[in-house]
Image (cartoon, helix red, strand yellow):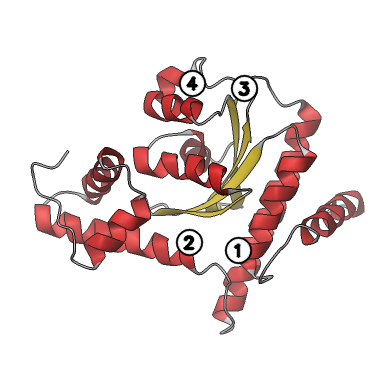
């Protein structure tokens, strides 16, 4: 890392530290990062999600509750720029969710527009071949990010990746990672997938699709549905949507 880049990251970290409220663990730092990003880019909100190659995912932090709901839409619907950014390892830039993106992710774009989102820019959180999740930048107006703004967003994504890796190191050392609920939710979704797979005799991919379909049809969060399945208070039948 060049001294200039290191200096830019250090300045971002100082800005983020000023936005951290409550416990200064990994989750608190990521929430502060989202709030900082929303005020230092032409954005109305931001969110970060953890994802795995096995299909498990969870919203880890957001600039505010409204964008937490927007971020969770992608995991409930099983489509969206965040998921594509994670899958490809490349930024997915959508300056108008009513444009070509509406044909790519019809359900997501329709619901996102209903929540006031007009543009979204997704950046993978990765280092080398290791992918940890994705960061979304939302706008309530149509329009692209400039090349300088994309470069700044990539710096934020780098800081988020470093934060997640530091959290994993603390966890391995026996210290709390500070992510709590997001990691618990991610585990529950994966557990629920396995339970539905066995109960219905379907693949892991189809099991997750059924859980998402149930959550969407019943206007519930994916993590909440997964928790009920794991606790055996909800069973998906073969004829469920």
Of circles 1 and 4, the one toward us is: 1
**Residue indicated by mark 2:** 182
Name the N-terminal-most of marks 1 and 4.
1
Mark 4 highlights which residue? 101
- Mark 1 is surrounded, within 10 Å at the Cα level, by few (under 14), some (14 to 19) or many (20 or more) other residues, namely many
Locate residue 9 relative to residue 234 in the image: left or right.
right
For the residue labelled by badge 3, is the local secondary structure a helix, a strand or a loop? loop
Report the Cα–Cα distance between label 1 and label 2.
9 Å
Q: Residue at label 1?
A: 27
Query: Who comes first in sequence, dot 1 or dot 2?
Result: 1
Q: CA distance from mark 1 to mark 4?
A: 30 Å
From the viewer's perspective, is residue 100 above or below residue 9? above
Q: Secondary structure at mark 2?
A: helix
Q: Residue at x 45, y 45 (%)?
A: 72
Residue at 29% x, 58% y is 226
Q: Quadrant of the C terminus?
A: top left
From the top left corner, tell me how far across and down residue 131 is, in percent: 53, 52
Assess whether mark 2 and mark 3 are in contact (beta carbons under 8 angstroms): no
The image shows residue 35 at horizontal and vertical percentages of: 70, 49
Q: Which residue, given by chain and number where applicable, does mark 3 sit on?
A: 95
Query: How far across and how far down the image is residue 188, in percent?
Result: 34, 63
Residue 11 is left or right of residue 184, and the answer is right
Q: Residues within 10 Å of mark 3 (few under 14, many from 20)?
A: many
- Tell me if I can see residue 208 in this picture: yes
Q: Earlier in the sequence, mark 2 or mark 4?
A: 4
Looking at the image, is mark 3 or mark 2 earlier in the sequence? Answer: 3
The image quarter containing residue 214 is: top left
Q: CA distance from mark 3 to mark 2?
A: 28 Å
């Amino acid at each position: 890392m060049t001294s200039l880049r290191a200096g830019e990251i250090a300045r971002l970290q100082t800005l983020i530290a000023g936005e951290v409220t409550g416990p200064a663990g990994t989750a608190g730092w990521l929430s502060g990062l989202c709030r900082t990003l929303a005020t230092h880019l032409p954005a109305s909100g931001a969110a970060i999600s953890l994802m795995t190659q096995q299909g498990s995912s969870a919203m880890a932090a957001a600039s505010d509750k409204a964008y937490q709901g927007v971020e969770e839409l992608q995991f409930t619907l099983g489509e969206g720029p965040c998921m594509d950014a994670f899958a490809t390892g490349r930024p997915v830039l959508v300056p108008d969710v009513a444009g070509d993106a509406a044909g790519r992710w019809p359900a997501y774009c329709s619901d996102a527009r209903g929540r006031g989102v007009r543009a979204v820019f997704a950046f993978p959180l990765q280092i080398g071949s290791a992918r940890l999740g994705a960061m979304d930048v939302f706008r309530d107006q149509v329009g692209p990010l400039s090349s300088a703004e994309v470069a700044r967003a990539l710096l934020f994504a780098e800081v988020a990746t470093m934060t997640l890796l530091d959290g994993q190191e603390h966890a391995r050392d026996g210290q709390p990672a500070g992510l709590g609920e997001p990691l618990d939710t991610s585990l529950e979704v994966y557990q629920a997938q396995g339970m539905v797979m066995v109960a219905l005799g379907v693949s892991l991919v189809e099991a997750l699709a059924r859980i998402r379909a149930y959550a969407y049809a019943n206007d519930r969060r994916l993590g909440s549905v997964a928790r009920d399945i794991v606790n055996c208070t909800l069973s998906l039948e073969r004829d469920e949507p």
